[in-house]
Image: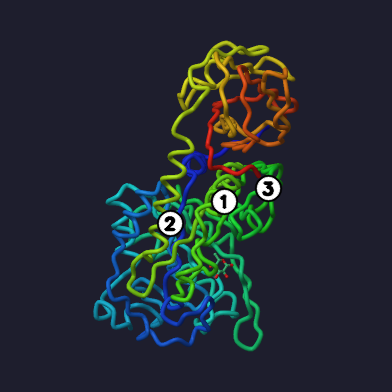
Amino acid sequence: MHPKPTLPQLAWQEAELSMFLHFGMNTFTDREWGEGNEDPQWFNPSQLDTEQWVQVAKECGFKYLILTAKHHDGFCLWQTRYTEHSVKNSPWRMGKGDVVREFARACQQAGLKMGIYLSPWDRHERTYGDSPAYNRYFINQLTELLTRYGEVAEVWFDGACGEGPNGRRQEYDWQGYYAVIRKLQPNALIAICGPDIRWVGNEDGYAAETEWSVQDPVPAFHGNATGKGWWPAECDVSIRPGWCYHAHEDTKVKSLEHLIDIYFKSVGRNSVLLLNVPPDRRGLLPDPDVQRLREWRKALDSIFARDLAVRKPVRASSAQRGHGAASVVDGKRDTCWMPRELPASLEIDLRQPTTFNIVMLQEYIAEGQHVEEYSVEALTSAGWQEIKRGTTIGHKKLDRVVPVTATRVKINILRSRALPLIRNVSLYHAPEVKTA
Ligand code: FUL
């Protein structure tokens, strides 16, 4: 059996871009990891406006937003009943404010998906390290977050786990946490320390050249699962050096070129990009970050403005009934080419010498991920030349190639775990894109 995504996994992967928002006590202490002994009085954003976060995210193409409802310092951004270490004891909105509520509302109004980060590691909570008691506390927190604020699309569990008081180690009840999430929000994806979304393995925003959404199960996160499962990669990276806002990093926002590279190496390598943009002490996305995000959106829009392969004549080595070659250039999402046998190839007639430097390939992942090796050839004035040899494709593979002028392009599927379903082939010419 070939694993396939669930509907929420498919929707998440197709959305491609998620925004991470690290905001909380660290924003006010200028730290990355608080110790848990911070005074709630220090939390006091002067102009908090979650609509600004959401509006910038939407404008720049993000479809999911994930807020740190509680980071390792244990400070809660919502009106929780289970601890005093929360916004209810801060001066902000006279202790009546609820950041999670304002965030959830803004996401809903904009039609974006809302997710929460809830740190299992908690440096404030006294029961931390007393395993059953803390697990109850954590499940109570989850229950509040999953019942009060409408639909939650993603729950993000960090892997960081430190020691509790006196060196006591907390045993997390992962299966218990998952059961509560499945019961209260059956469509929520459980990320990182969870069965639905996998950490890509670094915090640079780069997936691997070979990136399989099909993975061996990890018993801690998948219960007693046997056989392979669908566990797609997410690339989390911050637009700044740190995850939380620090004024001294206002000049260290990643460059446009760097962010474009991240896009190609995350979304363009069968992964979702979870880009962190930390709100500042005003409670707004910082101005330099907003400006950079807008430049990035504009650059991506211009790179992908014109597909040079769209509706060009295309021939396949073989095709199954209803899955003809033209499906890959018809611009439709729900059609795909499926050959009858392997190896298989497609040949696109560009009709005239056409210069491009980006090749985009997409599998129809609703039916799984299959392709193990492919090559791209171009018919130039010097004859056929192989311009790329790659491995996995998955939802989206973006290859930056040395600019080539060709009249025909061939895509060869050399090895595949099952007959491939190819949804799309596109070619683009972006003069400003460097090869990598
Ligand atoms: C890490 C945390 O320790 C960082 O503070 C941050 O939240 C990052 C996304 O995950 O493990």
Q: Residue at x 45, y 50 (%)?
A: 296
**Whether residue 183 is situated above or below residue 305 in the rendered picture:** below
The answer, for residue 116, to whether it is visible in the render is yes
* Rendered location of residue 245, percent (x, y): 45, 72
Distance between the Cα atoms at labels 2 and 1?
14 Å
Q: Which residue matches tag 1?
A: 262
**CB contact under 8 Å: marks 3 and 1:** no
Q: Residue at x 33, y 58 (%)?
A: 104
Q: Which residue matches tag 3?
A: 208
Mark drawn on residue 292:
2
Front tag of 2 and 1: 2
**Whether residue 170 is situated above or below residue 333 in the rendered picture:** below
Residue sitting nearer the eye, 418 or 183: 418
Q: Residues within 10 Å of mark 2 (few under 14, many from 20)?
A: some
- Which of disc 1 and disc 2 is earlier in sequence? 1
Q: Dot 1 lies on which element?
A: helix
Front tag of 2 and 3: 2
Q: Residue at x 43, y 40 (%)?
A: 301
* Rendered location of residue 307, percent (x, y): 49, 27
